[in-house]
Amino acid sequence: MKELSVSHLLGIKYLTTEDIELIFETADHFKEVINRPIKKVPSLRDITIANLFFENSTRTRLSFELAEKRLSADVVNFSAASSSVKKGETLIDTVNNILAMKVDMVVMRHPNPGAGIFLSKHVNARIVNAGDGAHEHPTQALLDAYSIRESLGSVAGKKVAIVGDILHSRVALSNIFALKKLGAEVTLCGPKTLIPKHIESLGVHYEPSLEKTIQWCDAVNMLRVQNERMSMIIVMHPGPINRGVEITSEVADHPQAIILDQVQNGVAIRMAVIYLLAAKIK
Ligand code: CP
């Protein structure tokens, strides 16, 4: 069986192109599974996974939980809002208490960049980063690139625009790493104040004009767009969407928008990630 080069999923930055392709091939299989009448496989019957959410989430949390249950893992959920974190417990103490209950894998969303990296150095479990501050959101980028591959046939050679607040977006950074590793051309578009300095060093272009960006791209991610090229490009958004703010209802509900396909692909991608990391449990 092919294996990932990493023991944790902390960021797209740490994956090889072969890792991403292996996740996609594995997700292809699980996508077929989750569209069967019986959506469950026994692959992770002996594995226990804790979902630790120190920050709000709808899509990522539900998607991970579904992915874990469809792989037959035992699942425990933790939300900071209703936990002893509120009484002053540290992250390491919280996680070590959970691990003492024999947990094999931790899926964590945390407001601090690098929280998953920190955890992976201090606890004996596979760690999956479900979003760490403005740093990375690797499974979102994997499901975004997977959705482009599904809609456009491949990612290599495609022109992808990421529009909006790039500076504060973990989705944008993970997307840039994933798209570049897979051979796409990437243009960022947004007000200069919301674009990180020296971002071109990651091999991406910056274009301030939304009109020019839309004319150029095959896919556009997380954005407020106009209708001109709606029949030629696919429109993506990681969610949650703010109707009337960065995206109009007309665009969000347009047939070329693949926002809910992204959500569906999220389950298959997360099943693939969990399944491949479970093979690394010693
Ligand atoms: N796309 C995304 O991460 O959504 P949630 O914050 O709802 O998980």
Image (cartoon, rainbow, N blue to C red):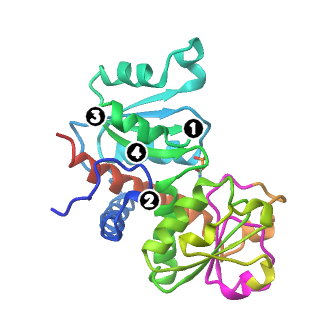
The dominant secondary structure in magenta is loop
Q: The disc labelled 1 sits on which kind of residue?
A: Asn
Amino acid identity at mark 3: Asp
Q: Is residue 155 above or below residue 50?
A: below
> Magenta stretch containing residue 249, yes or no?
no
Give yes or no for contact between labels 4 and 3 (Cβ–Cβ under 8 Å).
no
Residue at (42% x, 42% y) in the render = 117
Left or right: 260, with 192 as reference point: left
Badge 2: few (under 14), some or many (20 or more) residues near its Cα, within 10 Å?
many
| Mark before the other along the chain sequence, 4 or 1 | 1
Q: CA distance from mark 2 to mark 3?
A: 22 Å
Q: Which residue bears the numbered disc 4? A: 128
* Residue type pointed to by label 4: Val
Q: Which of the two residues, 153 or 211, is positioned nearer the viewer here?
A: 211
- Left or right, 227 with reference to 77: right
Residue 181, can we see it?
A: yes
Q: Earlier in the sequence, mark 2 or mark 1?
A: 2
> Between tags 4 and 1, which lies in front?
1
Mark 2–mark 4 Cα distance, whole angstroms, equals 11 Å
What residue is rendered at 15% in x and 62% in y? 1
Circle number at residue 104 = 3
* In the rendered image, the vertical position of residue 143 relative to residue 131, given as above or below: below
Which numbered disc covers residue 12?
2
- What range of the chain is rendered magenta? 213-241
Q: Measured along the vertical axis of the image, is residue 23 above or below residue 110? A: below
